[in-house]
Amino acid sequence: MIEISPWVIFFASIFTNNMIFSNFLGMCSFISVSNEIPTSLGLGQAVTFVLTFTTMLNYLIYHYILVPLGLEYLRFIIFIITIAAFVQLIEMLVERYFTNLYYTLGIFLPLITVNCVILAVSLFMVIRNYTFLQSVGFAIGSGIGWTLAIAAMAGAKQRIKNNKLPKGLEGAGITLIITGLMALAFVGFSGIVQIQ
Amino acid sequence: MDKKRVKQIFKSGIWDDNPVFRQVIGICSSLAVTNLLMSSLIMGLALTFVTAFSELTISIIRKFTPKHIRMVVQVLIISAFVIIVDIFLKAYYPEMSKALGPYVGLIITNCIIMGRCEAFAQSNPPISSFLDGIASGLGYTMVLLMIAFIRELMGFGSIFGIQLLGNWWTRWTIMVMPPSAFFIMGVIFWWARSKTEKKEEKKEGGKVTA
């Protein structure tokens, strides 16, 4: 494992290794929640927030509890429990103390537990042997990259809302094709940096 | 259980209610493996295994699970089966396990499994739930294989790693890259949707829609 600066990982995970455009992760909510820009920005923020903290937690749990005990194979269960518990905790805290925030972000929180991006970042972190700082950079970058993608998608969808489409292409079909076009644009970044 | 029911479960899982075309779920986490037929096949089979056995387990314990914690129970059962798949692949197909990377673990968050457990296994007896899991898994595998077939044939000129198209074939680099999966998926969606729509029109007695 070559030492890569966390900043490089941060930018790479936004542009060259974008979670949606090059890893196909988080597609479910990407397709269904990308109808309006404010909503998708809200979801993006919530994802970035949860992503950053669960990755930190999972890093600590994996390296300081699971590895010493030789229980690496349990990581799937442990990671998903951490994520679910964290989301639940945040939801309760936000509901109790920040009522305004709850109405804007709160509705997205249950959706997040099953968002593949969250679990994927923790798994990539283990596979690629990232250090703590690298993991944090990767998590924040992935979150921002995902937000960028979903907001751009919402913008494109709003634009074509009133246009006529072939019947079968409406909904998911056209969303996928637009995503393909955007992904093609993001391939242009791929020469800058590469992370594995 | 009679044959008719079995047939109906398979028909709805593979075509009528195909998780990908009709319900638009579960495409996350797996498009990434569709650049080679072999890895798509393994991924599809792994998912079929996990779906079938999780549905079976959940259906068996559905009467004793308290309603409000059923989601957590489902996730734990699914993760347990995914761990089995992961360990199995690591032991017998280490190369495949490396190629699939984190995507095996991501089967947990594949919405198809949770969706079927909620929609079917919660209210049906174990054996039909098991069959429903196999049917939805196969429906999903079919879509993956369709995409992978086009991508591998055009991108590498081969099928299941066997070189079919000779040197005259110019390899389409784009087919190996991620964007092509989105395009092919979109077009397949289009095709499947227009096909089912025509069928529905026919059922309504050839009513012409404007």
Image (cartoon, helix red, strand yellow):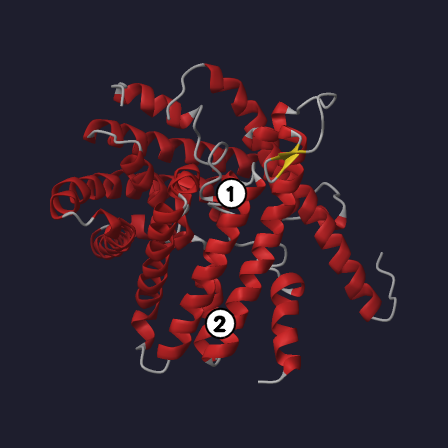
Image position, residue A101 (x, y; %):
30, 48
Residue A181 seen anywhere in this rendered image of the structure: yes
Image quadrant in which the N terminus of chain B is located: bottom right
Q: Mark 2 lies on which chain?
A: B
Kind of residue at disc 2: Phe
Q: Do labels 2 and 1 share a chain?
A: yes
- Helix, strand or loop at label 1? It is helix
Give the residue displayed 26% in from the left and 57% down from the top. Answer: A88
Q: In which quarter of the image is residue A13?
A: top left
Image position, residue A26 (x, y; %):
45, 44
Q: From the image, tell me which residue sits under label 1.
A: B39
Residue A171 lies left or right of residue B104; in this view the side is right
Residue A174 seen anywhere in this rendered image of the structure: no
Q: In this view, does A17 lie above or below A46?
A: above
Q: What mark, if any, has residue A114 been given in the picture?
A: none
Give the residue displayed 32% in from the left and 77% down from the top. Answer: B65
Residue A96 lies left or right of residue B177; in this view the side is left
Q: What mark, if any, has residue B130 been given in the picture?
A: 2
